Amino acid sequence: MATTRDHFGSRAAVIMAMAGSAIGLGNIWRFPYMVGEYGGAAFILVYILCSFILSFPIFLSEAVIGRGTHANAIGAMKQLAPRSGWMALGYLGVITPMVIVSYYSIVGGWSIEYFFKSFTLNFGEFRPTGWVPLIFNTIFLACSAGIVAFGVKDGIEKFNKISIPLLFVLIVLIMIYSVNMPGAEKGVEYLVKPDFSKLTGRTFAFALGQSFYSMSLGMGIVVTYSSYVHKDENLVASGVGTVLAALLFSILAGFAIMPAVFSAGIAPSSGPGLVYETLPHVFSGMGASYPIIGTIVAVLFFFSVVVAAMTSSISLIEVGVAFLVEEKGIKRRTACLLVFLLAWVLGIASVFSMNAFGKVDAFSSNFLLTAGVLLVVLFVGWKMKKEAVREEITNRGTVNNKIFDVFYFLVRYVAPIVVVIIFISNFVL
Ligand code: PFF
């Protein structure tokens, strides 16, 4: 393994890359709806708590594995627990992102198609499957793999450093417009009115699942990205920055989308229905009275969706590429081509059948992801030596000494119990 490894250039670059992976379709099409349906401000509160008490320590656990070994997800486990059952964690860390990117890029493809359609506001009926989605999926995947081919610093870092600030500016602009639309107050109310009676165990499980998915946990991403983080970088500080960026973006997306939906008098929804059916109606409605404004808002919105999806898909692709480069000695460009081809082939079923799409999504986001998260916390909390974990979190005793014990307690005791409950509830709910 004689490859010289790239590193992210600064803390800002680390946060932008991690936030790029975190901020994606999950924040745009699931979070706003969940907030409205599961208790408004009360849900947001639970979500923030889940993010800091559970997702954040799990994020740090993955960072300990990645930064501690400076290796890809499988290489890391080869160093830490060779030839043991824990290798499953490494394999899962490479397989899950491959499965996810196969359907995630299809959505990226729909978004490119809708970006072009926004210029005329002529969206037509939503056709999620077939040859046209296949073509746009191919374009989206090729662009994502193309960025990864440029490398960690010249590809991933550069793309995220431009995209993430841009995404924040765009979503704030759309939000300002949206909350000022006539009748927007109902949408704002939908998002903020606290309803504590909706906070059941089920809501809690959903909030946590969404938070894991949003933070890209349990799938080798944080392990791989952290492997490009310098030894003297403060992992806790980078982690806090990432959690805050993902949280803030989710909330802004909620206020950009729901007020506009309510203003158009349409019932809110989530998933593909929200982005590719409900919102096109909203934009066309705006366009009927002010064609230019409707077009501008739609173009900016779908552009943001494409970029947000791409900052996530490149992180998914990088996991497989890092594995091929470091473990199999394949050149980065060739590895990108191979991952592109594999993702493309894996996506064929989903691109032609929504049923397959739904199954792949549910299997990877409920089952594979939760299994990955569970293995990570068990590994870091119970298998790794406490001192080795402390070294990494505290940078050999120089930072974060006070919070280490809290982190360790959460990872060793709280997270495994909660994740087991979520795992079981995924089967029964
Ligand atoms: N976190 C991204 C989102 O919320 O859309 C999606 C995602 C990216 C999931 C990377 C998983 C992943 F590994």
Image: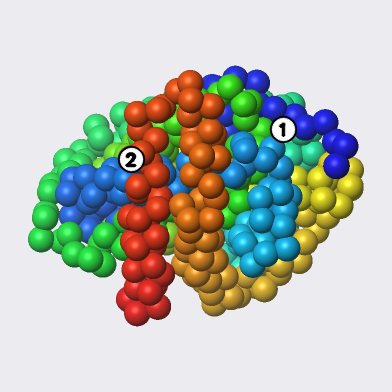
**CB of residue at label 1: within 8 Å of ligand 1?**
no
Q: Mark 1, mark 2: which one is toward the viewer?
A: 2
Residue under label 1, please give it.
152
Q: Quadrant of residue 189?
A: top left
Is 179 situated above or below 382?
above
Image coordinates of residue 59 in percent, x first then y, are 47, 44
Is 389 situated above or below 340?
above
Residue at x 28%, y 43% (from the top left corner)? 48
Pick the front one: 422 or 197: 422
Quick check: marks 1 and 2 in contact, CB under 8 Å?
no
Image coordinates of residue 187 in percent, x first then y, are 22, 46
SS at badge 1: helix
Mark 1 vs mark 2, CA separation in Å: 32 Å
Residue under label 2, please give it.
406
Quarter placement of the C terminus: bottom left
Q: Residue type at mark 1: give it.
A: Val
Image coordinates of residue 5 in percent, x first then y, are 77, 32
Query: Mark 2: few, some, or many residues within 10 Å (few <14, many ≥20)?
Result: few
The structure's colour scheme is rainbow
SS at badge 2: helix
